[in-house]
Amino acid sequence: MAVSNPNFKKKFEKLIPIIRKSILSDFKGLKSPAGLDYKTIWSHFQKSSVSKLERIVKSEFPGAEVHTTKTKSGFPDIKIFYGDKVYAIDVKSGESAKKEPWYDIARLDTIFKKRLEKYEEEYDIVIKYDKDTGIVENVFFEPMYRTAGKDLNSRGVKFRPYDGKLRPKPWEMFEKGEAYWTTKEDFIKAVKKSANYRKRKYIRQWWKELPDEERAELRKTLCQQKTLRDFSNANER
């Protein structure tokens, strides 16, 4: 029988400060004389923090199943199955010397099908470290939508132009507990803004690059499709 989970998110998010403190404590003991990188961070998290997080979840949510990935490239690092919903937790990291962490959150072209429609909620554990001293400076734990940056051109989520990968907000906002998108609904609107902006930009670029004859042919095709669509819509009324 499926476990009822209407209050999972509310209750789980109350546990976030406890889990975050535990993870930060685990990393305070990390010794890496050669310096840190994202691979070392991920490996240490798997060894020291995953089992604790799993115990907390299973203690607070009897009947929950917790699955963890075995490879750095797997997504998400942790899946929580509770009732008929799936929740995702992913581990991210970035160098403190940079004003903004530079890691992938998701892709504009697949975020709805592979992420938002698949998981009831996603959370990111973001680890801030100094790669030279080998010290983890802080750990943040937030719903994924709160971690996304803002693109000034589209006024939607921040993304890398050539592949559409979402990028995070500045470290300063992490430290202050601030977010550009404070609700999932606002985040979804921001994703659509950036996705459409990126599409329009490519269309304009590709349109200029087409030979005159092919532009004329495409214009004719688009006009024909609009006429057929208008005719179809009129007949459906």
Image (tube, rainbow, N blue to C red):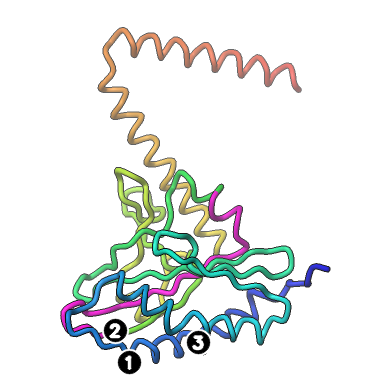
The quadrant of the image that shows the C terminus is top right
Q: How many marks?
A: 3
Q: Which residue is mark 2?
A: 136
The quadrant of the image that shows the N terminus is bottom right
Q: On the image, which quarter does residue 47 sit in?
A: bottom left
Of 127 and 179, nearer the camera is 127
Q: Residues within 10 Å of mark 1 (few under 14, many from 20)?
A: few
Of 158 and 50, nearer the camera is 50
Q: Secondary structure at mark 2?
A: strand
Q: Which residue is mark 3?
A: 17
Q: Secondary structure at mark 3?
A: helix
Left or right, 50 with respect to 170, comes to right
Q: Residue at x 30, y 76 (%)?
A: 172
Residue 189 percent across, percent down from the top left:
51, 52
For the residues carrying marks 3 and 2, which lies nearer the camera in this image?
A: 2
Q: Residue at x 22, y 83 (%)?
A: 134
Compared with residue 25, is residue 38 higher up or lower down, i.e. above or below? above
Pointer 3 with pointer 2, Cβ within 8 A: no
Q: Secondary structure at mark 1?
A: loop
Query: Can you name the residue that lies furthest to the right here?
Result: 1
Q: What's drawn in magenta, residue-wise? A: 114-137
Q: CA distance from mark 1 to mark 3?
A: 19 Å
